[in-house]
Amino acid sequence: MTQLLEKALGQVAKLPASEQDAVAAIVIAELASEQRWAESFAKSQDLLAKLAEKALADQAAGRTKPL
């Protein structure tokens, strides 16, 4: 565990139990959200690569407009 995390948890430990549970719920939800995003991006790499190739081909063929 890092020193910063130890410091944060030390501060959380000083809170009433209900507030500790609220902080824990936020941390758990954030970790779960990060995991879902990581899984979504991992699953979409092939599609993203194909879209990038198409965009580059469209640009090279002059089928795009500057923003």
Image (cartoon, rainbow, N blue to C red):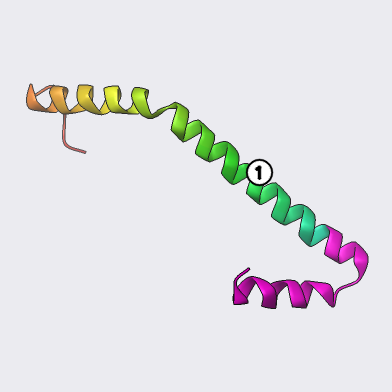
Side (left or right) of 18 relative to 56: right
Name which residue type carries label 1: Ala
Judged by its main secondary structure, the magenta piece is helix
**In the image, is residue 19 part of the stretch drawn in magenta?**
yes
Image quarter hosting the N terminus? bottom right
Q: Nearer the viewer, residue 6 or 21?
A: 6
Task: Look at mark 1 in the image and give the residue it sits on.
Answer: 32
Furthest residue toward left: 61
Q: Classify 31 as above or below 61.
A: below
User: Where does the image place residue 15, in percent across and percent down from the top left?
Assistant: 86, 74
- Which of 36/67 is in front? 36
Q: Is residue 49 left or right of residue 18?
A: left
Whole-percent x, y for residue 55 in the image: 21, 26
Q: Nearer the viewer, residue 16 or 42?
A: 42
Residue 35 falls within the magenta-colored stretch:
no
Occupied quadrant, residue 5: bottom right
In the rendered structure, the answer to whether residue 24 lies left or right of residue 17 reads left
Q: Residue furthest front?
A: 1
Q: Quadrant of the C terminus?
A: top left
Q: Residue at x 78, y 58 (%)?
A: 24
The residue most toward the right is 17
Q: Please provide the residue range marked out in magenta.
A: 1-21
Q: Is residue 10 left or right of residue 19?
A: left
Q: Is residue 55 above or below residue 19?
A: above
Q: Where does residue 12 sit, x and y in percent of width and height?
A: 79, 72
Where on the picture, by quarter, is residue 22? Answer: bottom right
Q: Position of residue 43 (x, y in %)?
A: 46, 27
Q: Give SS at disc 1.
A: helix
Q: Residue at x 13, y 28 (%)?
A: 59
Q: Residue at x 53, y 39 (%)?
A: 37
Q: Label 1: few (<14), some or many (≥20) within 10 Å? A: few
